[in-house]
Amino acid sequence: MEGKLMRAVQYDRYGGGAAALKNVVVPIPTPCKGEVLLKLEATALNPIDWKIQKGMLRPFLPTKFPHVPATDVAGEVVKVGAEVINFKLGDKVIAALTGGGGLAEYAVAKTDLTIHRPPQVSAVEGASFPVAGLTAHGALTQSVGLKLDGTGARKNILITAASGGVGQFAVQLAKLGNAHVTATCGSRNMDLVRSLGADEVLDYETLEGAALRSPSGKKYDAVIHCASPVPWSVFEPNLSTDGKVVDLSPGASAMWTFVVKKLTLSKKQLVMFINSPKAENLQFLVELVKQGKLKTVIDSTFSLSGAGAAWTKSIDGHATGKIIVEP
Ligand SMILES: NC(=O)c1ccc[n+]([C@@H]2O[C@H](COP(=O)([O-])OP(=O)(O)OC[C@H]3O[C@@H](n4cnc5c(N)ncnc54)[C@H](OP(=O)(O)O)[C@@H]3O)[C@@H](O)[C@H]2O)c1
């Protein structure tokens, strides 16, 4: 691969949306110690990809320009770096890339964030997990304390934007954890979200839905908040005595609520969750797929040269499930 070229999509400054993405030809990267080079089969987009482009994580990401975005990939190992013992050429894998690189024909992955992909899990399904699946998993297990084998106390959980990339997994995992799930989504996706296991579904464009009120009058022990910001005054009356809102995209108002609730020792809390990918949790999700307990809703699939259209679709915020680019 040394000196060979590949197609990639990159941007060279903050801002500009899809129009700033350029189709380029660049050298195939070389894997270093503890890394593998993958020929990519599928890459999933996440809102964080275009938020990074917008400069919302400045000055941390991207670390340099030009930047090839996207982190969630499935592919085949075509080269191994030094000291790699658990992967060999030809292995099919799923990886969480640490510094982007997913919108390309090839990408380098760290082996500690790479797992084998069994034949029962497609490349598209596998690429859907690193951000969306692991965020749903982490928010439910770490922030809410839900036991996904269903052995814990039964909780009432609200999942907002249940038709989105994260929400679809959160509904299914919460049901595995024996929770009663209320979910919000648009009217066109209510049947889909019910089919994922939600016990009650609210159309977010109705008054009841905007108020996040459970149709059966349940108070929520936890909210996995995947939708755009909602004032605390909307959450508060719907929470149980020690109910907790887990906010995945906290704005300034949510951060202020977090501080106030802490300082006043409030039993009702708002906490933030930031995904930190771990191979063992990725493996857990893959096992669930193998057992037929977890499925992936795919919104749409694009070619690498059509990545701009995929980018625009993600920015629009109306995908049902995951947006995939197949290099
Ligand atoms: N903290 C973290 O580590 C972390 C990790 C992953 C994601 N996130 C964040 O979590 C959020 C969700 O991510 P995602 O990948 O699931 O997004 P997504 O796939 O883009 O979500 C799109 C879905 O949201 C639905 N939706 C939009 N507004 C809604 C509302 N007010 N109520 C109910 N549903 C609504 C849309 O339905 P319609 O088409 O019907 O409008 C669509 O199906 C994003 O802000 C993302 O940045 C954070």
Image: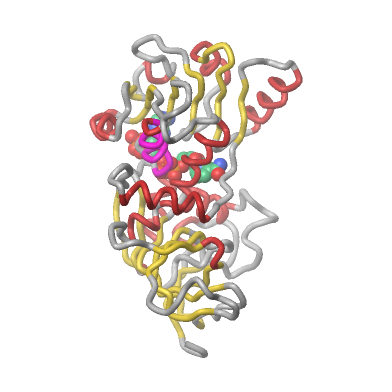
Q: Quadrant of residue 181?
A: top left
Q: Quadrant of the C terminus?
A: bottom left
Q: Nearer the viewer, residue 206 or 168?
A: 168
Q: How many marks?
A: 0
The segment highlighted magenta reads: 165-174
Q: Quadrant of residue 216?
A: top left
Residue 242 shown in magenta: no
Residue ranking furthest to the bottom: 3
Residue 68: x and y in percent read 52, 67
In the rendered view, would you say 317 is above or below 43?
above
In the rendered view, would you say 248 is above or below 133?
above
Q: How is the image coloured?
A: secondary structure
Residue 227: x and y in percent read 46, 33
Ligand 1 positioned in quadrant: top left
Query: Which residue sits at x=44%, y=28%?
Result: 151
Query: Which residue sits at x=46%, y=51%?
Result: 46
Residue 171 shown in magenta: yes
Residue ranking furthest to the right: 263
Q: Quadrant of residue 202?
A: top left
Query: Which residue sits at x=54%, y=29%?
Result: 144
In the rendered view, would you say 271 is above or below 294?
above
Q: Nearer the viewer, residue 245 or 316?
A: 245
